[in-house]
Image: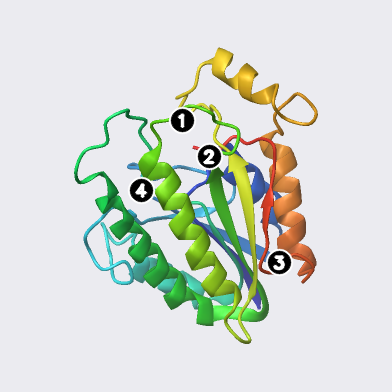
Amino acid sequence: MTGIHLLIGSGGLVGEALVERLSDSRNAVLVTSHRQPLPSIGQATSFFWDICSPADPVIQDHESHGIPALEAALEGGTLRSVSLFAHPSFVRTDSPSEGSLKGLEDLSRIVRLIDHLRPRLSPDGTLLVFFPSLSLHRAGGYLFARTWIGALEGVFGEWSRIPQGPLTTGIEILVSPDRHRPHMTREMESRIASRTSRGRLATAHEIADFAAWLILSRSPLFHGQILRTEGGPYY
């Protein structure tokens, strides 16, 4: 039976590189995206899903490309891995609005979707959670982003404690520019790179190589851990 690898959120350049590494004659890659028209990402098949939609995340549909269509695709193989990239937009502001933390409702949609998909994972499957990292950002104004990341870490901790659950590992990716969202200047990128151990940011391909190894090796060595990388890009 065909193995299936699912990306929740397209993951920018890291996601593109990961799709390339997971696609072969025995494995299919499915990707959800909020973008319209749906992006073409290597050999992956794309489905619409919007983290910010008020619709039920399990039954959300859009022009027959939503979760029902994804469910039908999953029937054709064994779900080997789920990689979670999706997150709401992070906007820097020195004066957060009164309702700025209401975006945490989006996290409940992610939890419901992952809880719905997790039983479908094969016994030796992998749940890989990508965390946007602000660890090297010294500027303020990221209240919602830091709150979101902290809440996701708590959810991750619960997922990793589920008996007989999938191998669950987290990867922090430094928020840096990419062609989809060039939200940092090169000067900012250089300052952040200077704070890393090697003085440069890891590339998308380096991150994808490591992520693919975690998924394909099914190694339990990093279960329940969030691993920090000094690079990206992540959007």
107 to the left or right of 61: right
Which residue position is annotated with label 1? 180
| 103 is higher (above) or lower (below) than 40 | below
| 17 is higher (above) or lower (below) than 197 | below
- Looking at the rendered structure, the kind of residue marked 4 is His
Which residue position is annotated with label 3? 26
Spatial CA span between label 2 and label 3: 24 Å
Q: Quadrant of the N terminus?
A: bottom right
Residue 22 location, x and y as percent?
A: 68, 56
The answer to which quarter of the image holds residue 159 is: bottom right
Q: Earlier in the sequence, mark 2 or mark 1?
A: 2
Which residue position is annotated with label 4? 34
Mark 2 surroundings: few (<14), some (14-19) or many (≥20) residues within 10 A: many
Residue 83 location, x and y as percent?
A: 57, 59
Q: Residue at x 41, y 49 (%)?
A: 147
- Residue at disc 1, secondary structure: loop
- Depth order, front residue of 46/196: 196
- Residue at disc 4, secondary structure: loop
Spatial CA span between label 2 and label 4: 12 Å
- Looking at the rendered structure, the kind of residue marked 1 is His
Spatial CA span between label 1 and label 4: 13 Å
